[in-house]
Amino acid sequence: MSLPTESIPHRLPSESETQLSQQSSRTLAAHLPQNGTTRTFKIVDDNGEENAIELPASALHLLTEMLSQMAQGNAVTVVPIPAELTTQEAANLLNVSRPHLVKLLEAGEIPFHKVGTHRRVRFEDLMRYKENINQKRMEALDELTAQAQALNLGYD
């Protein structure tokens, strides 16, 4: 079930929310599962009635990050990302133009399939490509840094 974005307030957290988020994020972080399991929590309603809720590790990590951001005074918005993306959605996530993304797809850089005449990209494939590109960029930067240091160009 998703909430309409109009019903979610877009505002910075108050001072009391910031303090509570800081305490909550620390407590939750101490109980994060390390092996991808779930955690069961008890929720106590206004009448004192307890209800158990089981949450997957991925949701707990996301909740911890949200609380950490709120503890720093930042507003937080959750945007769902579908498992399959249109070319425009994929291009937006890579911060490139749609025509450039299509070239990458057609060159076989990123796997895709067609639904009718429309290309679709799996989110996992797109993130794998992005990680690979970032890794290559870091390796190139490390190489340039090593060359600059070897030539004593003043980059210590």
Image (cartoon, helix red, strand yellow):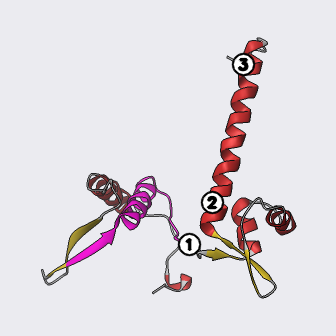
* Residue at the disc numbered 2: 127
Picture layout, residue 42 above or below residue 135: below
Distance CA(mark 2)–CA(mark 1)? 16 Å
Element carrying mark 2: helix
Residue 54 is drawn in which quadrant?
Answer: bottom left
Q: Where, by quadrant of the figure, is residue 45 drawn?
A: bottom left
Foreground label between 2 and 1: 2
Judged from the image, the secondary structure of the residue bearing numbered disc 1 is loop
Residue 26 is one of the magenta-drawn residues: no
Q: For the residue marked with disc 3, what is the amino acid?
A: Tyr
Judge whether residue 58 is colored magenta. yes
For residue 55, above or below residue 1: above
Q: Residue at x 45, y 52 (%)?
A: 72
Query: Residue 132's mark?
Result: none
Disc 1 residue type (three-letter): Val
Give the magenta-colored segment's residue range: 52-79
How far is disc 2 from disc 3 in space, using C-alphas? Answer: 32 Å
Which residue appears at 71% of the width and 66% of the height? 111
What residue is shown with label 1?
A: 79
